[in-house]
Amino acid sequence: VVGIQDKSTNLALTLLGNLLQHNFQGKIYPVGTDMNYLGVKAYASLHEIPFRVDLVIWAGKRANWADFLVQLIAKGCKHLLLLSKGEMTDLHTHNLKVIGPESLGYINAELQIFASPLGIGYLPGQTALLTNADFPSKLLLQNFYANGIGLSHFVDIGTSVDSADPADSADAADAAGDGGRGHPDPDPGENRRHVCHRQGGGTGHGRCAAFRARPAAGQ
């Protein structure tokens, strides 16, 4: 989790708290300071983490993006979730699977990953929800929870992703549970249905096509 600062309103610190609250069982490495936060050892940079990192969550400042990207590539990380703004240029050329920027986060019920700053509950289930809009995303999550609809995955792809780009659409489909392209999801056929919500211009055909191309894509 990149961007940790000692502030009550810090996005990365809120996300770290949500990961811990939802009982994620893997290793978490806060990045941005060498202090410890919420009982978790933090590191000043990605370079200093002495272990492999499967998923990097960017919640840092735009001014620090260029240096972060150099560290990310040098570390060999393959999965990137962009919660704050960043430059998307050439990320796919480095074999990165990217969600964002300005994403509201990622939820994987089976792995107990709640990588989102949202303070909203969810129920485990077999529906994957893919969205790209801030306020409607919150409403959809609230309605799913209130009506007892269980989620296997929640993916908010953010405001700046190009859903017409086949690589971006495929990354979104992979993150929503129908992997097979290197995403660390252990069960690519677990979903029974996908719900796609798109706000803004375009038709979203590329995203729907990406879901249909996944193995055992369901409904």
Image (cartoon, rainbow, N blue to C red):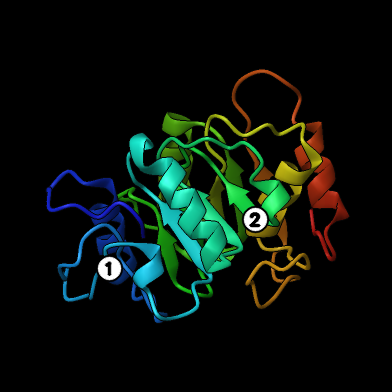
- Write down the residue under mark 1: 43
> In which quadrant of the rendered view does residue 208 lie?
top right
Q: Residues within 10 Å of mark 1 (few under 14, many from 20)?
A: many
Q: Which of 61 and 165 is in front in this view?
A: 61
Residue found farthest to the top: 201
Quadrant where the N terminus is found in the figure: bottom left
Residue 106 drawn above or below residue 39: above
Q: Nearer the viewer, residue 64 or 16?
A: 64
Task: Identify the residue at horizontal 45%, vertical 42% (top origin).
Answer: 66
- Residue 149 rendering spot, x and y as whole percentages: 52, 56
Q: Nearer the viewer, residue 166 or 107?
A: 166
The disc labelled 1 sits on which kind of residue? Tyr
User: In the depicted view, which residue is nearer to us: 141 or 131?
Assistant: 131
Q: Residue 137 carries which label?
A: none
Residue depicted at x 66% and y 78%: 186
- First of labels 1, 2 by sequence position: 1
Q: Give me the residue at 51% from left, 31% from top.
A: 133
Q: Can residue 148 be seen in the rendering of this structure?
A: no
In the displayed structure, would residue 59 be above or below residue 114? Answer: above
Question: Is residue 87 found left or right of 12 in the rendered image?
Answer: right
How many C-alpha atoms fall within 10 Å of the one at disc 2: few (<14), some, or many (≥20)? some
* The quadrant where residue 32 appears: bottom left
The percent coordinates of residue 112 (x first, y second) are 45, 72
Q: Give the residue drawn at x 30%, y 51%.
A: 3
SS type, badge 1: loop
Label 2 secondary element: loop
Q: Mark 2 points at which residue?
A: 96
